[in-house]
Image (spheres, rainbow, N blue to C red):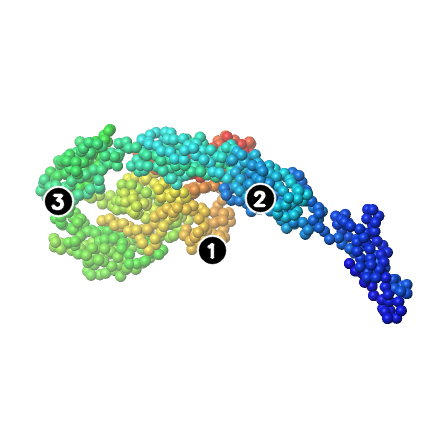
Amino acid sequence: MTMTATDYDDPNEGSNAKLKYTIEQNQVNENHELIFAIDQDTGVITTAVCCLDREAISEYTIKVVATDGGGLQGTGTATIKIRDINDMPPVFTKKEWYVQVDETEGDDIPELPILVVSVRDEDLLETNRFSYKVINSTFGADKFTMVTNSDGTGSLKVAKPLDYEDPMQRYGFNITIQVSDHGGETSNTYHIDYSKVFIGLIDINDNPPEFSKPLQKASVYENVTIGYVVKQFQARDPDQAGKSMVRYSIDRSSDRRRQFKIDQSGIVAIQRPLDRETISRHDIRILATDDGIPPRTATATLLVDVLDVNDNAPRFREDYRPIVPENTKPELKVIEIFAEDPDLPPSNKPWFRFRLADNADSIIQSSFKVVFNKDGDNGKGSATIYTRVEFDREVQKEYELPIVIADSGIPSRTSTNTLTVIIGDENDNPMYPGSKDIFVYSYKGTKPPLYIGQVHVEDEDDWDDVDKVFYWKDNKQHPNFELNVTSGDIIMRDMVSGGKYTLHFMVVDQKRNEEATAVVTVTIKEIPEEAVYNSGSIRIAGHSDEDFIRVWDWKNKVQVESKYNKFKDILAKLLNVKKNNVDIFTVLKNPEQPLFTDIRFAAHGSPYYKASKLDGLVALHRKNIEQIVGVNITMVGIDECYYEDKCEDSCTNYLSVLGDRPATVNANRTSLVGVYARVVAKCTCGARDFSAMESCKTRPKPCYNDGICSDKFGIVNCSCSEGYTGPQCQKTTRHFGGDGYAWFPPLQQCEKSHFHLEFMTQNQNGLILYNGPISEADPGEKIVQDFFSLELQNGKPRLLIDFGSGTTEIVVNVQPILSDGEWHKLDVFWDRETVTMVVDNCVTARNR
């Protein structure tokens, strides 16, 4: 470098402006030699010795003196920085590095480094050209690579998949890494250093269990007993060195009827009866789930072919209802009948044999003849029915023939099928004046014109409507009603309020040239929404909607009390209310199961009773009601979710009310115009279904017990009266003195359920909650038997639960017992496979 000084004397006058440079404070090396020299005329500073070492001293400061010809001096300071050259070797800061890394999931290579290493090099960073690499001299070295970072460090990264399940990799890797500060490959060992890296491999749950036999097949007779072992599955999880636990289960979407079960040793057994005629082959998905985080699941398949046994009796191929005209001479061929059998056909023919039952009524035996034809129906066998006598419909409208059908299976199965022969009508009897009562329930949304029934006159002929013409008596039409002159249909023109109306008609039989008067009394009663949405319900079998309201016994030709009225009477007695406070407003033939009739009813003191109370009382007195009313009740509290083929997982019953579509039932002397209300199953968990926008207009009303509803932005708020603290103004606390009870709606069917309650008692034994049937089924009758029972037994909580796969018992051994007069919490969690009961958040509980 050059030091320059300035003198303001005139350089052309003497020597005053002539400058000379010297070093006043020089630096010396370890040999006490001066390091720098300066040219006294030019001020150029040079080194006086060789081989300065920047790593020893990176910077020097010297004092330079400039003297002019007059002897005046000036000083300056020179700072000399030593430029670095790459003359120092790199050295790893550690000779051994340790790191642990998760095994990779398949071919998914992590982007982030697993280790960052550093080196010491006394040269400046910008002088060095660091280069890191893995020395490929040991097993697994090729699975890693080094990357040089801008700060001079090196990053060790995974280059290839790592697999803990590989025995060669399980115990980790011992690799050597290299660093060079010359960049790239170099042969100068002075500028190279090495270090060891010990890499431990961590097992992650990256493998699902593996089945030893992922596909198994079995053939099972359909009549095998419950508990019969079908197959055994074995699965092993490669993770955790094969020591992880594997839990077996069945994918219930492949076994919706839950006919199979699997235990934790992998044994698949029969849980519910099989039926080849319903499902001939089961494709069951077996699941094996490990205990890793997150758990992984493998799937195997069990194919079960159900072998046939002759377990079904033959039956009519169709519902035969032949018509024989009255006043027709015998022998008249009535019909040829055929049979079918869901079992596989036998090897020998004929498959079926027919005969009239030996215990058939003497009138049947004397009136009909059954002729068996072994070659009929292509050799399967058939029978032809002939008449033996001439029939009169007014004596008997129909005959029920017990036909015995036997198949050719081993062992042979026999059944008795009823053939209903209808006697066709001929207009051969006079008609007489008649009367009819029509009861109309007026419901919100019902829109006229509304069909309410037909004009009725007494006439033993009942197929002669085509011969009749209907008129208003004296041509005086009621302003609120219309009449169809050809059919006799009565139409309510305007929706009138409650009250009673008497209508008078004239009926003319054109064929017989007769006429008769008819009187129809129409009673109208308003039914509020509160009644409909708090209604109880039953389903009856063997009686049509017309049978339920009919008051005329045509067989015995006498007036009788209708089943409708009998049911209303017994409801009033059970509820201890006036009969007028009971409404049976829906009598509806089930559209999906025509042999069943659904009935809905409501009752009130003030206000209307809840459906849970109505259904509970009817269920409790079911047998007595059946005997008095003369019906067969197959279901109390209609539950469409009971049928297992409705939904795979969650299922919720919703009451569908069609206000503009009345449910009209017309019998000869009576007619009921009710509310079309039926239960519809939806495959959702109603308790958690928030898809619909909340509104105060929702039905049933969102606020109970006269709560005041307000809604804003799709959020409903209920303002409740004192004592009703639930979010929808429910009463959340009940007190019992030892013999009391409270009815609640049944638990909803959800794929995963959680039930919570808090209780306080000093009694060691007692029922806390029960959900299920409360009356026994009649012999041979199938009713809902699933139940949920929560009780205290010796002060300990006991749960009994059965959803169709057998009763499960859970008892929690608590210390101290729960009958200590303090509040306690019970939580029950259940799904398709497991049930758990938790007491007081597990603070004092021990499982047993």
Q: In whole angstroms, how far apart are the C-alphas of marks 2 and 3? A: 101 Å
Which residue lies most toward the right here? 70
For label 2, the crowd category at 10 Å Cα-Cα, with few meaning under 14, some 14 to 19 and many 20 or more, is some
Quarter of the image for the N terminus: give it. bottom right
In what element is the residue under mark 3? Answer: loop
- Residue 643 position in % (x across, y down): 35, 41
- Residue 683 position in % (x across, y down): 39, 46
In what element is the residue under mark 1? Answer: loop
- Is 302 rendered above or below residue 491? above
Q: In whole angstroms, how far apart are the C-alphas of marks 1 and 2? A: 58 Å
Residue under the point 68% across and 52% down: 126
Mark 1 and 2 residues: CB-CB less than 8 Å, in contact? no
Mark 1 and 3 residues: CB-CB less than 8 Å, in contact? no
Answer with mark 1 or mark 2, whichever residue precedes in sequence: 2
Circle 1 sits on which residue?
Answer: 714
- Residue 212 position in % (x across, y down): 43, 33
Circle 2 sits on which residue?
Answer: 145
The circle drawn on residue 326 is 3
- Is 739 rendered above or below residue 44? above
Tell me which amino acid carries mark 2. Thr
- Is 410 rendered above or below residue 670? above
Residue under the point 75% across and 53% down: 82
Asked which quadrant contains residue 407, the reply is: top left
Tell me which amino acid carries mark 3. Glu
Residue under the point 18% across and 48% down: 462
Q: In whole angstroms, how far apart are the C-alphas of marks 1 and 3? A: 66 Å
